[in-house]
Amino acid sequence: QVQLVESGGGLVQAGGSLRLSCAASGSISSINTMGWYQQAPGKQRELVAIITNGGMANYADSVKGRFTISRDNAKNTVYLQMNSLKPEDTAVYYCYYRIHGPPTYRYWGQGTQVTVSS
C-alpha cells in the first residue's frame, strides 16, 4: 500500500497562485508516476498533470503555461505550482501515484479543495 498526504489547497482570487504538495509513503517503488487530477462538482475526474520519476511531464491543455508540476524523488513528493488561477480551476484536486508493472497499482490521495473566486 502507498499512502498519499496532500496539502496546499485553499481559497484564492482569480489571477492568484497556489502550490499543492503530495507526499507518498509506504510501499514506494522507484519506477513510478505521480501527478494530479481534478474533479469539479458534477464532472468526472480529469487529468491536470503527471510526471514520471525520470522527470517527464504531461499537462492538460487547459493548464499549459499556467501550472508547473515537479517532484523531489528523495522526498517522494510531487508539487503543483498553480499560477494565473481561473474560476474554472475550482475543483477538488487529487494526488495520484502509479507503480509501473506488471502488475500496475494506482493510488489516490484524499483530495484537497481549490476554490478560485472571481
Image: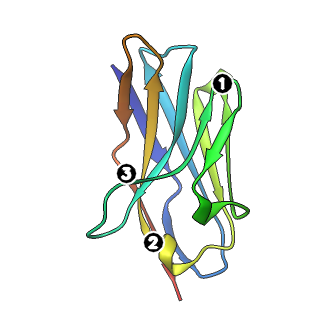
Residue drawn at x 69%, y 67% as measured from the top left: 83
Tell me the residue that label 3 is attached to. 111
How far across and how far down the image is residue 13, in percent? 58, 82
First in sequence, mark 1 or 3: give its number: 1
Distance CA(mark 2)–CA(mark 3):
13 Å
Tell me the residue that label 2 is attached to. 90
Which of 109 and 40 lies nearest the eye of the viewer? 40
Distance CA(mark 1)–CA(mark 2):
28 Å
Tell me the residue that label 1 is attached to. 73
| Local SS, label 2 | loop
Distance CA(mark 1)–CA(mark 3):
21 Å
How far across and how far down the image is residue 17, in percent? 66, 68
Q: Is residue 13 above or below residue 47?
A: below
Q: Marks 2 and 3: which is nearer the front?
A: 2
First in sequence, mark 2 or 3: give its number: 2
Which of 61 and 82 lies nearest the eye of the viewer? 61
Amino acid marked by disc 3? Gly
| Local SS, label 1 | helix
Residue drawn at x 45%, y 31% as measured from the top left: 97
| Local SS, label 3 | loop
Amino acid marked by disc 1? Asn
Q: Is residue 66 above or below residue 24?
A: below
- Label 1, residues with CA under 10 Å away: few <14, some 14-19, many ≥20: few
Residue drawn at x 38%, y 18% as measured from the top left: 104
Amino acid marked by disc 2? Thr
Q: Quadrant of residue 76?
A: top right
First in sequence, mark 1 or 2: give its number: 1
Is 103 left or right of 77, judged from the image as shown? left
